[in-house]
Image (tube, coloured by chain):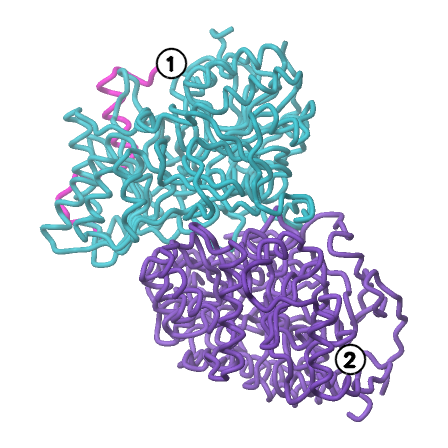
Chain colours: A cyan, B purple
Amino acid sequence: MNKKYEMVKNAAGRMVPTEVNGKAQVPYQGVNGYRPVGHKAAPPIASCSDYPMDGNKVVGSIKEALQLAGLKDGMTISSHHHFRNGDLVMNQVFDAAEEIGAKGLMWFPSAAFPCHEPMIRHLESGLIHHIEGSLNGPLGKYASEGKMDGLAVLRSHGGRWQSIQDGEVHIDIAVLAAPTADSIGNATGDRGPSACGLLGFGLADSMYADKVIVVTDNLVPFPCYPWQIQGQNVDYVVVLDKVGEPEKIVSGTTELTKSPDRLYIAELTAKFVKAAGIMKEGFSFQAGAGGTALAFAIYLKEMMIETGVKARFVRGGSTKYLVEMLEEGLTDYILDGQTFDLDGVRSMRENEGHVNTSPFTSYNWHGKGNFASLLDVVVLGATEVDVNFNANVVTHSDGQMLHGIGGWQNCLFSKCTILPIPAFRDRIPVIVDEVTTLVGPGELIDVIITERGIAINPLRSDLIEATRDSGLPIRTIQELKAEIDDLIGGSPQKPKLTDQPIGVVKWVDGTVMDTIFKIENLK
Amino acid sequence: MNKKYEMVKNAAGRMVPTEVNGKAQVPYQGVNGYRPVGHKAAPPIASCSDYPMDGNKVVGSIKEALQLAGLKDGMTISSHHHFRNGDLVMNQVFDAAEEIGAKGLMWFPSAAFPCHEPMIRHLESGLIHHIEGSLNGPLGKYASEGKMDGLAVLRSHGGRWQSIQDGEVHIDIAVLAAPTADSIGNATGDRGPSACGLLGFGLADSMYADKVIVVTDNLVPFPCYPWQIQGQNVDYVVVLDKVGEPEKIVSGTTELTKSPDRLYIAELTAKFVKAAGIMKEGFSFQAGAGGTALAFAIYLKEMMIETGVKARFVRGGSTKYLVEMLEEGLTDYILDGQTFDLDGVRSMRENEGHVNTSPFTSYNWHGKGNFASLLDVVVLGATEVDVNFNANVVTHSDGQMLHGIGGWQNCLFSKCTILPIPAFRDRIPVIVDEVTTLVGPGELIDVIITERGIAINPLRSDLIEATRDSGLPIRTIQELKAEIDDLIGGSPQKPKLTDQPIGVVKWVDGTVMDTIFKIENLK
């Protein structure tokens, strides 16, 4: 059943719906075009009179906690994704909601993973009306096929904070899996048998939700410290045998590449950063958890050691590679948004310089500044880039919505944003005339690095100037594209899209940047 | 000029004004009688578009920062008191406001100290209309004399948080002195040449004020970590030569008593805690910073060592005595709300178990629980106690308003609240028929300990039972009072109070517990 959407053209020339999941939308107005008005969301005032004086908020089960929290049809239930594909809580939460007999719920995870495939049953039964959040794997496919009631709403990590803070998304009940907690609800991710690092993606949920349920498998005597989640925001605590499988947080994108092409791209990227004068004493960088970005960090580290240069801070997603840099004294701080492996978890627990951050400090665009714009250089992936440096990270060239945005949009505000990408994927060129889905505006993307050369955004004459005599293979993006298309024998067929929206991409300010349409050959 | 107030009788039988400083009030309705309605205060939504992308918020002077923050007549300016009598910032702030030509401001410090005597000039000129906050020393005297426009409003630390969070007090501009900060506004109190420990009393200000100014004398490269105040809440940073004299945080009440009577009271208190079975493995306690309370902690420590008992946590105001306990392994944690000496400052910086807390986690009554009610025993001071165990901590028996409430009211929710107090002060008995000012309801006060014996609140039959055979000098409060009055030759003259309110005492829930009246022989 196709739903009709009224569409308008936004400032990027993209057609976007005026209403999404029953809420009026503001179309994208340019990178700095939209100014918010009004005040932040304001949670209900609680009273200690209504909470146990001995601080013991433990209840018997998830079902009991949901009932006490007043679960009703149409409510929004939120969760964080720090266990990534190892989450053992949220399927149980919706199974319990089914037992209670709820209907039409919105699930608002910071991201969903293949382990959440059982939610498809709940989507089909009407228990879950729709999901707003990054949809990886089977749920992404399900939504791509247009089967979900309502639209998928893809937000960056900062955009998710913004949407909660600004009251665009009202969370009725937050369910926060916690590797360690005490009975008043203080919780931390950095210790306990299921330690996953930090809980920053659940912080806004804990602050703004009407009711907050902490679910742990490691209840400790008060105080649970650090208290990444504060018990004064928590209503109920549930103790389970096991809340997550931390060994599975490594799943997904966090493995070092072995491809010679990609290793070469990573090396080129590190050389570019050095040649441009970015790699200097006290600098900062962020590299995503993709294979190429990890390899970049390793090359950069070698150069830092050679040159005797130390960073002031690096931003994670932390991995053992960043942890090594911290422990070898190559950076004063890791400012970490999520741990991508167990070395990251250990380091966060052990190293004072390994600091847990939240989307508020790192990414929220509707704050008084954030960390992302302070970075000297950030290295990110992309599925497509166009000749105006616009980039896509959520759909593939075949139009399928398969990735979340993560911190990607937020990171674009760094002083130098580099996308190291292969020239082809499955013989499909990655540089295109127009991206299938616009996720990052070209004016914020400074450098594209492929195995066939480097293209610098003409807006960055400073970078062009700085690297002119570097000996690096610097070309125009048009030259790069022409060469790649030549090799392949012309631009490939674009996917045939229907006019049926199946999702939208939000910009960091909550405006609608683009629409994801259903593909014609999919049912 | 006396102002007329409409007065009503509250649930404690006290006459309280229905309006204070232009705002309608709710009279006290009993310890758990009042339930808040509505939502928390909601600060304006900001946008990174309006803040420097390089994070540099440093401006040239306090005056410039106030102007950029839009200082206008009638605004409320807030500050924290972590420098206690060593604050060097707030006098400069109001001098700058005077230069700008502002009028009718409200100063909303978490406490004022003798060093703030220059504010009297601003009160007299009309620059400051009135002050809401603990008034110690000359400002307390000034208000006691009825010279201040508007009423003094005395709140507990938790009550101050509650009043900001609930929107009772709207802060236009917060000015937060910070011993270390970076240019984006991250700030910490635990390091730097003026290190004062923590900044928790300014945390609500940073979260809820429209504009936030951080003033530091130690600007460090980003990131300033720990970030007790988060730069994402900060608008401007000002750098001065010196923001505070940390050696003066020891001023006030934080010296160990040398009085034999008080040492005896302290010892009795420790013995009572042991006899009542409170001092057991994993217990917790809080002792204020008064001389007797400090001595109690030392006696208790000796008993803990003798008995081989360890605490799970102690609550500070931290002093070297608590720090020794932590460093000797006698407690796992100090949960600290303010450092009272430089050992406390050092320990907070060095010891992972010395945790900085805020009034939100510790004391706020309008949260989902707080730490205060988890304590096994708390030892506090008082200026007067009546035969129903009601207590006073803000006025002396002569009626003068000379003390703030601090965390005193909040601490009453512990599992056992003990007031160790001398039987006399300046030959005036401390146990009275009716307290001059009601600050703590008797139902929350469990034990009174004087050098003439111990009185247990009849409501606590469990404590009476537990200590029956302890050999401690346990009496009824009536017996104690009779003996003391006998010694002095009858109850003393009560101070003659006028019917002119000069201040009010708020309960932890924002309701009005009592009125402070002007004394007849004062002008």
Mark whose residue sits in front, 2 or 1: 2
- B520 up-or-down from A85: above or below: below
Q: Nearer the viewer, residue A463 or A246?
A: A246
Visible residue check, residue A13: no
Instruction: Locate residue B328, reporting x and y percent.
Output: 31, 61
Amino acid on which the number 2 mark rests in the picture: Ile
Q: Residue at x 30, y 51 (%)?
A: A376
Work out whether A95 lies above or below B398: above
Residue A244 is left or right of residue B12, and the answer is left
Q: Amino acid at mark 1?
A: Gln
A475 is within the stretch colored magenta: yes
Asked if badges 2 and 1 are on one and the same chain, I answer: no
- The number of numbered badges drawn on the structure is 2
Label 2, on which residue?
Answer: B502
Look at 17% across and 40% down and name the residue there: A298
Q: Which residues are magenta?
A: A466-493
Quadrant in which the N terminus of chain A is drawn: top right
Q: Chain of mark 2?
A: B
Separation of marks 2 and 1 at Cα, in angstroms:
81 Å
Residue highlighted by disc 1: A493
